Image (cartoon, rainbow, N blue to C red):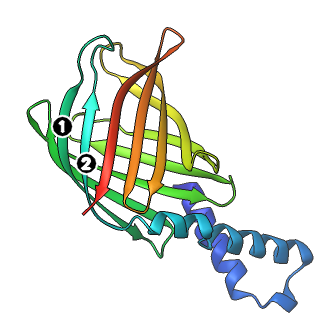
Amino acid sequence: MKCLLLTATLLALLLHHPAQAQSAEQQAAQKAWMDYMTPTAMHQMLAKSDGEWTFTMNSWMDPNAEPMKSTGNATYHMVLGGRYQEMRCTGTVMDMPFEGMGTTGYDNAKKMFVSSWVDNMGTGMMYMEGKWDEASKAVHFTGKMLDPATGKDCEVKEIYKWVDDNTQQMEMYTVVNGKEVKNMEITFTRK
């Protein structure tokens, strides 16, 4: 909360003082804040996914077993002036109604994508950060989530790929005993 108040105070001070009355340090801080808050080409790339999609999902509880198959719908739309993209999913997973939502953005200061996810299959939140890889047309995310079976955080990895304007793919892995194990793959198709 203190950080939020400090941020609001700094912005108010920086934006309400004319540039000629500011010191070089204040001008540099104002420029940094303006750069931080201005959507970039990465945000525009996210915006191209806005719209309605369907998805098919394979998931594994046991990597040696056949995957469980699920289907559903997803809606993407940019929020907060084009700074973040919200995704909402509905469908059926393990024969149960499923709904989830995520927020993805590009942090201009960190020079990386940031992502959060919540759904009705748990009560925790997953947070990941990742870099864009031009060669694979994908963001390679890493992060942590709680494993309710152990009560401890586990490492997760997600590869989110833009195959073309109408197809996206996501693969998710968890790290078990130091080894990456694929537990989900999803293909999104634009309606």
Q: In front here: 191 or 99?
A: 191
What's the residue type where badge 2 is placed? Phe
Considering only vertical position in the picture, is 157 above or below 11? Answer: above
Q: Quadrant of residue 107?
A: bottom right
| Real-space CA distance between mark 2 and mark 1, rounded to the nearest whole angstrom | 8 Å
Q: In front here: 149 or 142?
A: 142
User: Residue 28 appears at what percent x and percent y?
Assistant: 84, 72
Considering only vertical position in the picture, is 140 above or below 19? Answer: above
Q: Secondary structure at mark 1?
A: strand
Considering only vertical position in the picture, is 4 above or below 188? Answer: below
User: Residue 151 appears at what percent x and percent y?
Assistant: 36, 17
User: Residue 187 appears at what percent x and percent y?
Assistant: 33, 45
User: Residue 163 appears at what percent x and percent y?
Assistant: 46, 52
Q: Where the C terminus falls, by quadrant?
A: bottom left
Instruction: Please report contact status of discs 2 and 1: CB closer than 8 Å, yes or no.
Output: no
Q: How many marks?
A: 2
Residue at the image point whose x is 62% and y is 63% from the top: 6
Taking the image as shown, residue 39 lies to the left or right of residue 27, namely left
* Label 2 Cα crowd, 10 Å radius (few <14 / some 14-19 / many 20+): many
Q: Quadrant of residue 31?
A: bottom right
Taking the image as shown, residue 44 lies to the left or right of residue 165, namely right
Q: Residue 70 has which mark?
A: 1
Q: Residue 55 has which mark?
A: 2
Q: Secondary structure at mark 2?
A: strand
Q: In front here: 32 or 168?
A: 168
Q: Residue 28 has which mark?
A: none
* Label 1 Cα crowd, 10 Å radius (few <14 / some 14-19 / many 20+): some
Q: Earlier in the sequence, mark 2 or mark 1?
A: 2
Residue at the image point whose x is 59% and y is 63% from the top: 42
What's the residue type where badge 1 is placed? Ser
Q: In front here: 81 or 59?
A: 59
Q: Is residue 34 visible?
A: yes
